[in-house]
Amino acid sequence: MDFAIISLIISSFAIIISFYFSFTSSYKGILDRYNDCITEIDRILINNPELIAIYDECKIETKKNDELFMNKMEAFIYLHLNYFENAYFHYLCKKSLLLRRQKCVWCNFIKEFFKNKYCVTVFNENKDLYDSSFVIYIKKIINKL
């Protein structure tokens, strides 16, 4: 009987450790996904510095007649929207205390992004491409700006 109790304690301890490592590796995977998204955006900006205009509406206005620039800008906006949708399903619609920091970072990033009216226009013209719950979430953010 003593062996059964000891075995139960050791098994319980092993299960707790297993859950802990599983959870922390999942959390690390979430952080890695965020870092990959930001790194890719940075890489694109390094290779195409004119796309920094996405964060400055006035710079887009001055290049509206440049078709190549506008096509690149639209593709860059889609990249952001796809990352935002991914973030929405991985962070923003989940209720987790550990993800609170990531939620805050993504929310702030999304809010800053949609301060640009051109980004809002591209989103509104193509919202059918995205999940309806994500569209509702983004519309709430846009309406608060």
Image (cartoon, rainbow, N blue to C red):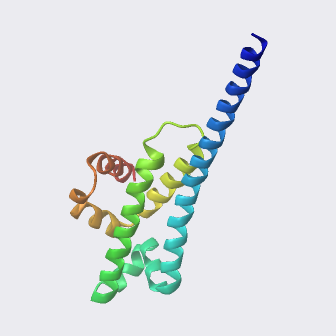
Which is nearer the eye, 141 or 72? 72
Determine whether, in the image, residue 136 is placed left or right of residue 108: left
Q: Is residue 18 above or below residue 8?
A: below
Task: State the residue at coordinates (46%, 49%).
Answer: 90
**Residue 14 spot, x, y in % from top left:** 69, 32
Q: Position of residue 63 (x, y in %)?
A: 34, 86
The image shows residue 142, relative to residue 17, as above or below, that is below
The answer to whether 54 appears left or right of 132 in the picture is right
* Residue 29 drawn at (x, y percent): 56, 54
Image coordinates of residue 15 in percent, x first then y, are 64, 31
Residue 129 appears in the figure? yes
- Residue at position x 42%, y 61% from top? 83
Among the 4 quarters of the image, the one containing residue 99:
top right
Residue located at (57% from left, 43% from top): 100
Where, by quadrant of the figure, is residue 120 drawn? bottom left
Res. 114 in view = no
Residue lying at the far top in this picture: please name it.
1
Quadrant of the rendering where the N terminus is positioned: top right
Residue occupying the point 60% across, 42% down:
22
Viewer-side residue, 51 vs 130: 130
